[in-house]
Amino acid sequence: MSEANHPPNASPSSAPPKPAQKALTKAERRELQERQRAAKAANAGAKPPKPPKQPPQAQQQQQGTSSQPSTPRPGGSSGLGPAAAKKDAPAAASSQSAPTAAVTDAMRGLRIFSHFGLPKHAGTLRSNVKTREIHPAILRLGLQFAEFNITGANARCLATLQALKTVIQDYATPQDSTMNRDLIKHLTPQITYLVSARGMSVSMGNAIRQIKLYISGLSIDLPEQDAKELLCSQIDTYIQERIIAADQVITSSAISKIQDGDVILTYARSSVVEKMLLEAFDLGKVFSVIVVDSRPMLEGKKLLSVLSSAGIPCTYCLLPALGSVISQVSKVFVGAHSLHANGAVSSRAGTAMVATIAKTHAIPFLICCETYKYTPAVQLDSFAMNELAPASTMHANLPSSLRADLRLDDETEAAQRPNLHALSPLYDLTPPSSITAVVTEMGIIPPNSLAWIPLSQAEQ
């Protein structure tokens, strides 16, 4: 019984310790190798390359050598002690710094607004342009656009057309080409520079497209100087018919809607609305004006100065105070940045709020806009296409004594709240349901009939 229970050299209790002893030795070797590799990676400042996966038998054969590189296992599965974890900390920090920086940049870039036209700095424009390809008039205009010295759809379009006229007058056709082909190529970098300075408006795009049609229609047999004079004459005709004369017709149509004793409300500043109010006052109309304004542009201050200098009774308030004065208003006249085929109107940010409040109080809301600002694009919200106002305009209209203090306060707040960003979109979209009518040079039309504009222009 005793021999059966305990056979010689076959004790069941003596067999398990030998594999356990070998397994413990392998674990110690593996831990030592991983510590050495982690220390080398920490000293080199780089993460060791990850070896290809091998079958278990090959791994057992290579466990005795330390020449094969392998990546330490993350977390507690690697079997590293506290000392090895401390040595591996610099490598882990360096490997995680790049994704962290990328995430920070993405947060600062605010990906939801990444497609907006971001404001450019004058120094950036000067460094990123080949001055030999860009005409000095275009360089000057681009800097004015970037610094927001020229604002408004009409003002920007007029300045662009005048600058392109100068480019055309100084252009010389190469010997191996014709003017109707090479001039368009010559204008391309000029236009690209203007777009890089500030996003192209709908009015500028339509005007530039029309100029290219004029150029492509030039006769090959026409002398170069005569072709230049013809192009400049066509540009002048476009300015006269589509902007100047159109504003006169719009002014006459809008004045007919003003009655004595009316209180006219306008938002921000529109060149055609300004002309209309001045001419109506010169014709003897008795009315008063409420100028509603908002940051960051505060364009209503300039309109207020012009109207009050002419003798028109004016009241000035900011957009949050609109509710306290809306009950006194008879009609609302505002300008527009662009007209869309679905009847929506893009204008200065805050116009949609004014239209909504006017509709709530059953006050006529009239848009004064030229048809050359029409675009067949359908826009449903103000996030599809927009621009951001530069941060410098936030306090540009304040006294210099307050400007420095507020700028320091903003910088301090930005340092304390790195995830808080102040954004000022320039435009918003007013739906056709909030618009009473659109006053154009073709007449006063309902917003749902804006798609009729191209057909009317084709008939003319």
Image (spheres, helix red, strand yellow):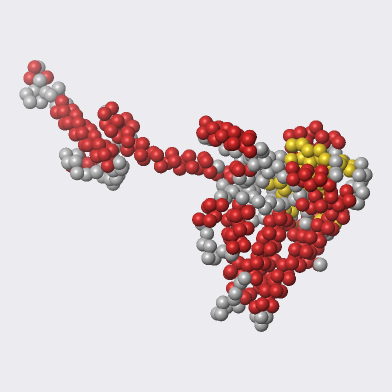
Q: Is residue 167 above or below residue 449?
A: below
Q: Which residue lies furthest to the top in this view?
A: 2
Q: For the C terminus, which image quadrant?
A: bottom right
Point out residue 14 in the picture as x, y percentages from the top left corner.
Answer: 13, 24
Q: Which quadrant of the view contains residue 17?
A: top left
Nearest the eye: 409 or 403:
403
Determine the residue positioned at 58% across, 56% down.
Answer: 196
Determine the residue positioned at 51% across, 33% down.
Answer: 415
Point out residue 82 in the picture as x, y percentages from the top left corner.
Answer: 28, 27
Determine the residue positioned at 82% across, 34% down.
Answer: 325
Point out residue 248 in the picture as x, y percentages from the top left corner.
Answer: 83, 58
Asked whether, in this view, residue 383 is left or right of residue 52, the answer is right
Point out residue 43 in the picture as x, y percentages from the top left corner.
Answer: 26, 39
| Residue 215 is at least partly visible in this image | yes
Asked whether, in this view, residue 443 is left or right of residue 54, the answer is right
| Residue 355 is at least partly visible in this image | no
Asked whether, in this view, residue 256 is left or right of residue 198, the answer is right
Determine the residue positioned at 19% across, 41% down.
Answer: 66
Q: For the N terminus, which image quadrant?
A: top left
Q: Is residue 34 above or below residue 3?
A: below
Q: Is residue 297 above or below residue 18?
A: below
Circle count? 0
Q: Which residue lies furthest to the front in this view?
A: 401
